[in-house]
Image (cartoon, rainbow, N blue to C red):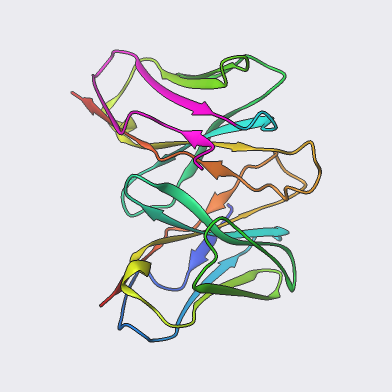
């Protein structure tokens, strides 16, 4: 059974803090993605990675960075959290070997920045 | 620039009736389309997909229709069940270019409520 896990389900941080969101997949997938979900805006891609140490900006990368040191782990970093980064963060993974574009999602992290 | 749009934020139907969720796209390079379902406090799960070389794909109660000339796709659920109540996202990808790495562009989502 495929599995994508995220380090926290709920997180509360203060403005200006550095925040780390961790994502781990156990499917040996090449591609990993970070999205944020906001009401009325759907899922918006922040960053993605298609290989270890490789990363590409998504549609809304400002204020975020990522790290992929190992194939199974993809981290999202908020360098200095701001209130407009309060959101649901979703991690996903996919493989070149499987159905085109089918991504497997983690349960999400609800981040609140106060 | 919203390349994938779901113009109906919500839809309410009676159990046993048909649910039709709609999605429009603007990027003519998209060649693969997917529908995801999301329950509260869970990540989205893949539901059904369709390639641009087809106009229909069916899987049990779920059918996706693609109208390329209109850049429109729809998801039909027949018959609808209360357990189908969730947020439905359509998504699209451009795979022909070979460098998309499976990247998806999502719509805003439609909240489906199926009443018993």
Q: Can you tell which quarter of the image residue A72 is in?
A: bottom right
Residue B17 is one of the magenta-drawn residues = yes
* Residue furthest right as drawn: B98
Q: Nearer the viewer, residue A18 or B47?
A: A18
* Residue furthest front as drawn: B1
Residue, x 78% and y 49% (percent of image)?
Answer: B99
- Side (left or right) of A100 relative to A44: right
* Residue furthest bottom as drawn: A17
Q: Is residue B103 above or below residue A78?
A: above
Q: Can you tell which quarter of the image residue A17 is in?
A: bottom left
Residue, x 56% and y 16% (percent of image)?
Answer: B70
How far across and down, in percent of the image, does residue B24 sit? 50, 26
Residue, x 54% and y 37% (percent of image)?
Answer: B3
How far across and down, in percent of the image, does residue A57 sit? 63, 62
How far across and down, in percent of the image, does residue B79 sit? 35, 15
- Side (left or right) of A98 relative to B44: right
Q: Is residue B65 above or below residue B114?
A: above
- Image quarter (top left, top right, bottom left or bottom right) of the C terminus of chain A: bottom left
Q: Is residue A103 above or below residue A5?
A: above
Q: Nearer the viewer, residue A99 or A51?
A: A51
How far across and down, in percent of the image, does residue B108 sit? 41, 40
Counting labels gives 0
Residue, x 46% and y 73% (percent of image)?
Answer: A7
- Side (left or right) of A34 relative to A27: left
Residue bounds of the magenta highlight: B1-26
Q: Nearer the viewer, residue B1 or B23?
A: B1
Residue B64 is one of the magenta-drawn residues = no
């Amino acid at each position: 059974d495929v599995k994508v896990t995220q380090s926290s389900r709920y997180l509360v941080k203060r403005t200006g803090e550095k925040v780390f969101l961790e994502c781990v997949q156990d499917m040996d997938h090449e591609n990993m993605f970070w999205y944020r979900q906001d009401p009325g805006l759907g899922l918006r891609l922040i960053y993605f990675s298609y290989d270890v140490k490789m990363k590409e900006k998504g549609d809304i990368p400002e204020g975020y960075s990522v790290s992929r040191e190992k194939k199974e782990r993809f981290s999202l970093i908020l360098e200095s959290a701001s209130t407009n980064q309060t959101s649901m963060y979703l991690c996903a993974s996919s493989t070149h070997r499987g159905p085109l574009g089918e991504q497997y999602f983690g349960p999400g992290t609800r981040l609140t920045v106060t | 620039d919203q390349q994938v749009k779901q113009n109906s934020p919500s839809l309410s139907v009676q159990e046993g009736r048909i649910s039709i969720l709609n999605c429009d796209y603007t990027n003519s390079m998209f060649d693969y389309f997917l529908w995801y379902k999301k329950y509260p406090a869970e990540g989205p799960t893949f539901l059904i997909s369709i390639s641009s070389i087809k106009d229909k794909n069916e899987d049990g109660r779920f059918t996706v229709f693609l109208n390329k000339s209109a850049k429109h796709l729809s998801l039909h659920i027949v018959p609808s069940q209360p357990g189908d109540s969730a947020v439905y996202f359509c998504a699209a990808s451009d795979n022909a270019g070979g460098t998309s790495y499976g990247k998806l562009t999502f719509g805003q989502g439609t909240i489906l409520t199926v009443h018993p």
